Image: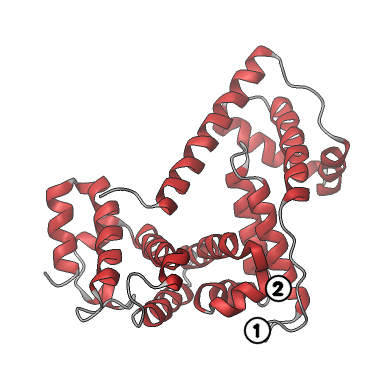
């Protein structure tokens, strides 16, 4: 099974992040790190030295890189992210989009743009976790992320030319909520998306505009939360809860098959992964 474009994107992100971290360590060893940008320094000051030092010392223990070098790395990353942010589309949000107040949608959009700006930087994981937590703490952030995946008209209206990235990061938000014990938004979004796509053929334009990848990534997000070991002993009802049914069109059933087999194969190997997948999908 050849990886989809969305899978290749995820692989590229992981490789880029690894190379960025490796490069950061080599730069430190060579003493090549310079002074950060004024904007980054101001932001670091604003965040408070106590909080900053606690975070840096924790990262120092995890990476083996001195906190002073990590601080300079953070300043450089913040400066580069700011440069990127200025080039990322910033759609104008109209009032009361999809029943949400303008400021709520703008807040989520802003967080997604910042996530895109740190893509591939050494601190992208930490920044994305921080921004995701920020969305989940907002009163309507989780609902906006859910709607971005289930209402394509809302997504285009709210996020404009940034809608594909908004859907991608919305999946991360739902996955994080599920990992914290609130799996219902992830399950509901997956089910609603399947219902919408079940009436479309495999050649339908809407199905090919990333919606298949949305469904695939939602299923993979669910697998990440429950774990492959859980699925190895689960029954078909677990996947049916995600909207799967034996009567689904073949191109949608294949999405479930691909996602399950891909993740289970990594954990158990081809033969057992195929057997578990077949059992979960009813043979």
Q: Is residue 126 left or right of residue 266?
A: right
Asked whether the beta carbons under mark 2 and mark 1 sit within 8 Å of each other, the answer is: yes
Q: Position of residue 190 (x, y in %)?
A: 41, 74
> In this orientation, which residue lies closer to the viewer: 117 or 40?
117
> In this orientation, which residue lies closer to the viewer: 253 or 138?
253
In the rendered image, the vertical position of residue 253 relative to residue 101, given as above or below = above
- Give the quarter of the image for residue 108: bottom right
Q: Is residue 211 left or right of residue 265?
A: right
Residue name at image x 69 percent, y 60 percent: 111
Q: Is residue 108 left or right of residue 62?
A: right
Residue name at image x 74 percent, y 69 percent: 106
Q: Is residue 86 left or right of residue 227?
A: right
Outermost residue, bottom direction? 99
Quarter of the picture containing the C terminus is bottom left
Residue at disc 1, secondary structure: loop
- Give the quarter of the image for residue 254: bottom left
User: What is the distance, in whole Å, between disc 2 and disc 1 at their CAs?
Assistant: 9 Å
For mark 2, what is the residue? 105
Residue name at image x 14 percent, y 72 percent: 282
For mark 1, what is the residue? 98
Q: Position of residue 98 (x, y in %)?
A: 65, 84
> In this orientation, which residue lies closer to the viewer: 56 or 149?
149
């Amino acid at each position: 099974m050849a990886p989809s474009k969305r899978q290749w994107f995820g692989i590229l992100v992981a490789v880029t992040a690894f190379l960025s971290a490796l490069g950061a360590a080599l730069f430190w060893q060579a003493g090549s790190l310079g002074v950060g940008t004024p904007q980054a320094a101001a932001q670091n000051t604003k965040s408070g030295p106590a909080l900053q030092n606690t975070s840096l010392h924790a990262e120092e223990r995890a990476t083996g890189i001195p906190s002073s070098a990590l601080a300079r790395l953070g300043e450089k990353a913040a400066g580069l992210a700011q440069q990127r942010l200025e080039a990322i589309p910033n759609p104008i949000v109209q009032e009361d989009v999809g029943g949400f107040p303008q400021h709520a949608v703008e807040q989520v959009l802003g967080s997604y743009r910042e996530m895109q700006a740190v893509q591939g930087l050494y601190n992208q994981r930490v920044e994305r976790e921080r921004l995701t937590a920020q969305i989940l703490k907002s009163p309507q952030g989780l609902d906006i992320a859910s709607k971005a995946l289930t209402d394509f008209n809302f997504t285009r209206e709210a996020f404009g030319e940034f809608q594909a990235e908004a859907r991608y990061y919305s999946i991360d938000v739902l996955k994080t909520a599920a990992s914290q014990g609130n799996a219902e938004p992830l399950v509901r979004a997956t089910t609603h998306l399947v219902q919408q796509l079940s009436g479309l053929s495999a050649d339908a334009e809407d199905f090919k505009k990333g919606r298949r990848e949305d469904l695939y990534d939602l299923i993979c997000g669910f697998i990440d939360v429950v774990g492959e070991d859980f699925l190895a002993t689960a029954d078909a009802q677990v996947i049916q809860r995600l909207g799967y049914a034996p009567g689904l069109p073949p191109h949608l059933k294949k999405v479930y098959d691909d996602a399950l087999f891909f993740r289970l194969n990594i954990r158990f190997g081809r033969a057992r992964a195929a057997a578990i997948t077949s059992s979960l999908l009813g043979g």
